[in-house]
C-alpha cells in the first residue's frame, strides 16, 4: 500500500534528505508517494503545516518548540521525530566589513568575534550606523546561535547591531545591494554570495557549536498519531536518503539533483562547492538524524535568554517533549539503523569524536564543543539559564 505525503521545504542544502528520498526512489521503495512543495519563507512552511496544507515539513530546529510554547499564530501542537542533519550554516559579511575585521580563515570563531567587536567600536566612535545582520527567522538556530556568538564575543545583539529577518534565498542580493552588512544563513546561499563577489564567509556554525543541529522533520502531533505507519515508512526513507547524501562519492550526483528547477534551482557547480565547503553540512554521520532532547533544551534556554518565553518547569518540559527520540527509536530501529541509547547528552563536552553506545553497535559522536568552552548539561538547565548574560 502506498501512502501519499505532502512535504514543504525551503531551498537549502539540508533539504537534501527530502529531495533525495523522492528523486533517488527511497520514498517509493518504502511505500511513500512523496510530494514536495517549495516555499520561500519559514513562516509559510510553519503555517501551511499548522493548517493542514502539508503533512510534514523541513523546518528550523527551534520552530516546533516555539509553536508548542505559544509563540506562533496557531496553537497546533507540533513534534520533531527526526533531525535533518548537522551544521551547514555560516556567517557571511560584505567584502568591506571582512577587510575591516581582518581575520583569515573561518574556523576561529573567537578571532572573528573579537575582530567584529573592534570594527563595531570603531564605527560607533566615528558615528557610522550600526551593522545590519540578517537571519532567516526569529525562531531559528541562525538567530539563536548568532546571538550566542555575539554575546560571548562582547557584542550586544540588542544594542550593538540590528538583526533583521529575511528569507534565505534573498540574502545574497540584500548583501550585494548594501541592505545588509552580513547574514547568518544555510548553504548554498553563503557560497552563492561569495561566488557573486558580494561577500566573504567570516565564520561557520561548526566553529561556534560543532556538529550542532539545524533543521528537523516536523509534523503536527495529531497527524503523527493518526499516521504511525506512514511516519515510520517516511523516516526509514529519509534515513536511507541521509546515508546516500552523506557519502562523498554521491556529491556530484546530489548536486545535480538539487540543481533542478523544482529543487534549489542553483547551478550544480555552486552546489558542489557548497557541499564540500567550510560550512560542513553533515547528513548522516555523528547521529546527524537523531532528535536529541538536549538540543531542544539548549534552543529553549536561548529563547528564555532573549526574552521570547518565560522559564518555567512546564515550558521546559514542553520544549523537551517536542523532540521525539522515542518515535525515531521505533522507526529507525525497525529499519536496522543505529540509534543512540540515550535521549539527551551533555552538549559541549566532546572535544573530539568519541564512540557511544547504540542499539546494534556503536556510534561515533562529536566533537560538539562551543567556541567559548561552555558546557550545557540538560539536567542543570536552571543553573545554565541563571548564568546567562544579555
Image (spheres, helix red, strand yellow):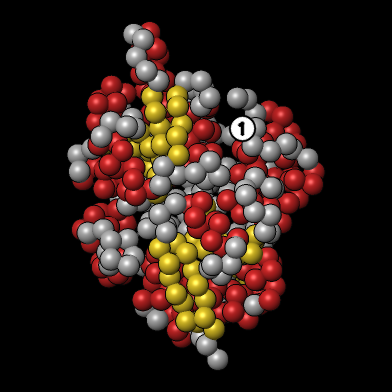
Q: Residue at x 24, y 42 (%)?
A: 194
**Front residue of 50 and 168:** 50
Q: Position of residue 46 (x, y in %)?
A: 55, 56
The relative height of residue 77 versus residue 138 in the rendered view (above or below) is below
The relative height of residue 388 versus residue 336 in the rendered view (above or below) is above
Would you identify the image quadrant in which residue 97 lies?
top left
Q: Residue at x 55, y 91 (%)?
A: 1
User: Seen in the image, is 344 located left or right of residue 280?
Assistant: right
The relative height of residue 61 versus residue 202 in the rendered view (above or below) is below
Q: Residues within 10 Å of mark 1 (few under 14, many from 20)?
A: some
Q: Position of residue 334 (x, y in %)?
A: 61, 79
Residue 320 seen? no
Would you identify the image quadrant in which residue 161 lies?
top left
Location of mark 1 (residue): 306
**Front residue of 374 and 69:** 69
- Secondary structure state at the residue bearing disc 1: loop
Q: Residue at x 49, y 44 (%)?
A: 137
Amino acid at each position: 500500500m502506498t501512502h501519499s505525503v505532502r512535504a514543504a521545504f525551503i531551498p537549502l542544502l539540508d533539504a537534501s534528505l527530502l529531495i533525495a528520498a523522492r528523486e533517488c526512489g527511497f520514498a517509493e521503495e518504502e511505500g511513500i508517494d512523496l510530494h514536495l512543495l517549495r516555499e520561500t519563507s519559514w513562516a509559510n512552511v510553519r503555517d501551511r503545516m499548522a493548517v493542514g496544507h502539508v503533512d510534514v515539513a523541513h523546518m528550523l530546529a527551534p520552530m516546533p518548540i516555539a509553536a508548542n510554547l505559544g509563540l506562533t499564530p496557531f496553537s497546533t501542537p507540533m513534534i520533531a521525530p527526526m533531525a535533518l542533519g548537522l551544521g551547514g550554516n555560516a556567517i557571511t559579511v560584505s567584502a568591506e566589513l571582512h577587510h575591516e575585521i581582518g581575520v583569515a580563515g573561518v574556523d576561529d570563531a573567537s578571532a572573528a568575534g573579537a575582530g567584529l567587536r573592534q570594527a563595531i567600536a570603531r564605527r560607533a566612535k566615528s558615528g557610522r550606523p550600526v551593522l545590519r545582520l540578517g537571519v532567516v527567522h526569529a525562531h531559528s538556530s541562525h538567530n539563536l546561535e548568532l546571538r550566542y556568538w555575539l554575546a560571548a564575543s562582547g557584542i550586544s545583539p540588542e544594542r550593538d547591531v540590528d538583526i533583521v529577518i529575511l528569507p534565505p534565498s534573498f540574502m545574497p542580493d540584500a548583501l550585494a545591494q548594501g541592505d545588509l552588512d552580513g547574514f547568518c544563513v544555510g548553504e548554498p546561499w553563503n557560497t552563492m554570495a561569495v561566488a557573486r563577489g558580494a561577500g566573504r564567509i567570516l565564520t561557520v556554525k561548526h566553529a561556534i557549536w560543532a556538529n550542532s543541529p539545524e533543521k528537523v522533520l516536523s509534523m503536527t502531533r495529531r497527524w503523527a498519531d493518526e499516521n504511525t505507519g506512514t511516519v515510520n515508512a517516511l523516516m526509514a526513507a529519509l534515513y536511507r536518503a541521509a546515508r546516500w547524501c552523506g557519502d562523498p562519492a554521491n556529491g556530484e550526483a546530489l548536486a545535480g539533483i538539487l540543481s533542478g528547477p523544482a529543487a534549489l534551482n542553483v547551478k550544480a557547480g555552486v552546489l558542489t562547492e557548497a557541499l564540500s565547503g567550510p560550512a560542513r553540512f553533515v547528513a548522516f554521520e555523528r547521529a546527524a538524524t537523531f532528535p536529541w532532547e538536549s538540543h531542544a533544551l539548549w534552543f529553549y534556554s536561548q529563547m528564555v535568554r532573549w526574552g521570547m518565553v518565560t522559564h518555567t518547569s512546564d515550558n521546559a518540559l514542553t520544549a523537551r517533549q517536542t523532540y521525539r527520540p522515542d518515535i525515531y527509536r521505533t522507526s529507525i530501529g525497525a529499519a536496522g539503523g543505529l540509534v543512540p541509547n540515550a535521549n539527551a547528552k551533555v552538549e559541549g563536552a566532546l572535544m573530539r569524536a568519541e564512540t557511544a553506545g547504540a542499539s546494534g553497535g556503536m556510534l561515533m559522536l562529536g566533537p560538539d564543543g562551543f567556541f567559548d568552552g561552555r558546557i550545557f548539561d540538560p539536567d542543570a538547565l536552571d543553573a545554565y539559564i541563571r548564568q546567562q548574560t544579555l
